[in-house]
């Protein structure tokens, strides 16, 4: 790379990470996805309490799949089941975000290091490259929601490339909490130009097999993201999301 710029594989912009399956969702899957969306959008507000029968009525389904979905969401740290009181949506504070980002930073940075050690061929990194391209297109279009979706894909694929199932499991649970906070602050932040540059540095380090650089670049990126997010939460006095 004589000009010092990262050249990503030529990919079709907007190609989905995974083709949509024609298999219909089960009621449990549908309840899980719809309840998650309701939490992230604030329709189920932080700190609010809901009976399972109420949630079932909102989703127009029986209580059995709703209860299974609720148990899964409790395991992800989004809500808790309270005896005789139903479901409580858990709040997320700036202090929570600091702790969550501390853990995410170390685990994802380790995943980046391990991914760089795998000796991946360019075609193995196509999904990572596609996420970066989609983030760049989204920034040019000033489409923060599209950028956030591509950013989620980048981080999920980065962790997958590290091939550590326990890291995948823990990060997946914590990423939901980050998504809640980011959804609230998304339109308060500047356009994420520096974030895109950081993703390119991580990609390049993995492509070149530079494990130390991959880990250091990703740690710096996550630490910067933590400071910006916590600052937004505190500056706008969003004490519980």
Image (cartoon, grey):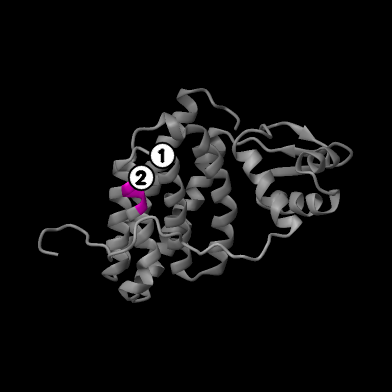
x and y, in percent, of residue 130 in the image: 36, 60
> Compared with residue 119, is residue 54 higher up or lower down, i.e. above or below?
above
- Determine the residue positioned at 39% across, 55% down: 14
Name of the residue lying farthest toward the front = 22
- The residues colored magenta run 134-138
First along the sequence among labels 2 and 1? 2
Secondary structure category for the residue under label 1: helix
- Determine the residue positioned at 52% across, 23% down: 237
Q: Which mark is residue 86?
A: none
- 67 or 161, which is in the foreground? 67
Cβ atoms under marks 2 and 1 closer than 8 Å: yes
Residue 63 within the segment the image draws in magenta: no
- Determine the residue positioned at 48% across, 66% down: 160
Name of the residue lying farthest toward the right = 84
x and y, in percent, of residue 52 in the image: 83, 42
Secondary structure category for the residue under label 2: helix
Instruction: Report which residue position mark 1 lands on.
Output: 144
x and y, in percent, of residue 229 in the image: 44, 36
**Image quadrant for the C terminus?**
top right
Q: Which mark is residue 138?
A: 2
- 188 or 234, which is in the foreground? 188
Q: CA distance from mark 2 to mark 1?
A: 7 Å
Name of the residue lying farthest toward the left = 2
Q: Label 2 neighbourhood size at 10 Å, few (<14), some (14-19), many (20+)?
A: many
Residue 77 appearing in the image: no
Left or right? Give the position of 87 relative to 111. right
């Amino acid at each position: 790379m004589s000009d010092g710029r990262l050249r990503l594989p030529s990919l079709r912009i907007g190609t989905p990470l995974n083709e949509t399956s024609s298999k219909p969702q089960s009621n449990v899957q549908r309840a899980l996805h719809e309840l998650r969306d309701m939490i992230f959008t604030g329709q189920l507000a932080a700190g609010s309490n809901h009976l399972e029968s109420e949630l079932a009525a909102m989703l127009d389904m029986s209580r059995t799949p709703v209860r299974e979905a609720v148990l899964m969401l409790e395991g992800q740290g989004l809500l808790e089941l309270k005896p005789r009181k139903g479901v409580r949506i858990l709040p997320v504070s700036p202090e929570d975000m600091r702790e969550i980002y501390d853990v995410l930073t170390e685990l994802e940075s380790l995943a980046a290091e391990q991914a760089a050690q795998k000796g991946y061929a360019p075609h193995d990194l196509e999904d990572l490259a596609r996420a970066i391209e989609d983030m760049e297109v989204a920034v040019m279009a000033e489409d923060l929601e599209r950028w956030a979706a591509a950013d989620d894909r980048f981080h999920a694929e980065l962790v997958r490339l590290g091939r550590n199932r326990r890291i995948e499991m823990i990060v997946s649970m914590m990423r939901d909490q980050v998504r809640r906070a980011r959804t609230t602050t998304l339109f308060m932040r500047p356009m994420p130009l520096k974030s895109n540059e950081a993703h390119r540095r991580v990609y390049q380090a993995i492509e070149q097999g530079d494990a130390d650089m991959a880990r250091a670049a990703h740690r710096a990126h996550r630490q910067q993201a933590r400071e910006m997010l916590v600052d937004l939460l505190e500056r706008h006095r969003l004490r519980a999301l």
